[in-house]
Amino acid sequence: MVSKFLANKDIRKEGSGNAGARNAGRLYGKKAFIFTFFGDALKGAFIVYLGRFLDYSTSILLLGLSFTCIGHIKPIFFQWKGGKGISAFIGGIIAIQPIFIFIILGSFLLFYLIYRSFTVPGLLSLASCCIAFLFLKESLANFLIAIMLMAIIMLSHNIPLRNFMPKKSNDN
């Protein structure tokens, strides 16, 4: 929607072909990145806040967020071609537990120092939220649902496992 509004183009036919914020930013600039990111994050947050309003448990909120992310990754109305689910996940997980803002930012900075790229540290920082469920004394069910959701998002990225191994330094 943002690419259509800003450039009258279909983002899925340009750049990486991905409908997410990262491709929008590369193609159309910071404004497109910000609008796309927040629009997608609001999708995840909305479903969580709606579930909270209806007094659902955290497990149900996480399942709702899972379906929102799946719909974001494989949208029916856009021929199954969407984003990677990151922004929707971030919006929803922060709506579930606001402390995740600090976990995401802190772990991203740590992983960025190790990997010196954005994709793998970004995914690992989101995975840190799943681990944090254990430390926040959430139920095992919530932890497992969060892990399942994170697995879906990681699979949408098609990143080989070797990319998650820290790069060796060439300093001798």
Image (cartoon, rainbow, N blue to C red):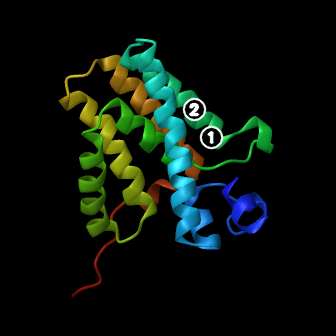
Q: Residue 124 at what x, y percent from top left?
A: 36, 51
- Near-viewer residue (106 or 158): 106
Q: Residue 119 at what x, y percent from top left?
A: 45, 61
Residue at position x 57%, y 72% from top?
29
Element assignment for label 1: helix
Name the amino acid type tagged 2.
Thr
Residue at position x 62%, y 64% from top?
24
- Near-viewer residue (58 or 142): 58
Name the amino acid type tagged 1.
His
The residue carrying mark 1 is 72
Q: Is residue 165 left or right of residue 82?
A: left
Q: Residues within 10 Å of mark 2 (few under 14, many from 20)?
A: many
- Near-viewer residue (13 or 169): 13
Where is 133 relative to 60, above or below? below
Q: Residue 102 at what x, y percent from top left?
A: 24, 48
- Near-viewer residue (117 or 170): 117
Where is 120 relative to 60, above or below? below
- Residue lying furthest bottom: 172
Q: Residues within 10 Å of mark 1 (few under 14, many from 20)?
A: many
Element assignment for label 2: helix
Q: Quadrant of residue 170?
A: bottom left
Q: Is residue 94 left or right of residue 24?
A: left
Residue 154 visible in rendering: no
Question: Residues at badges 2 and 1 in contact (C-beta under 8 Å)?
Answer: yes
The residue carrying mark 2 is 68
Residue at position x 64%, y 35% from top?
71
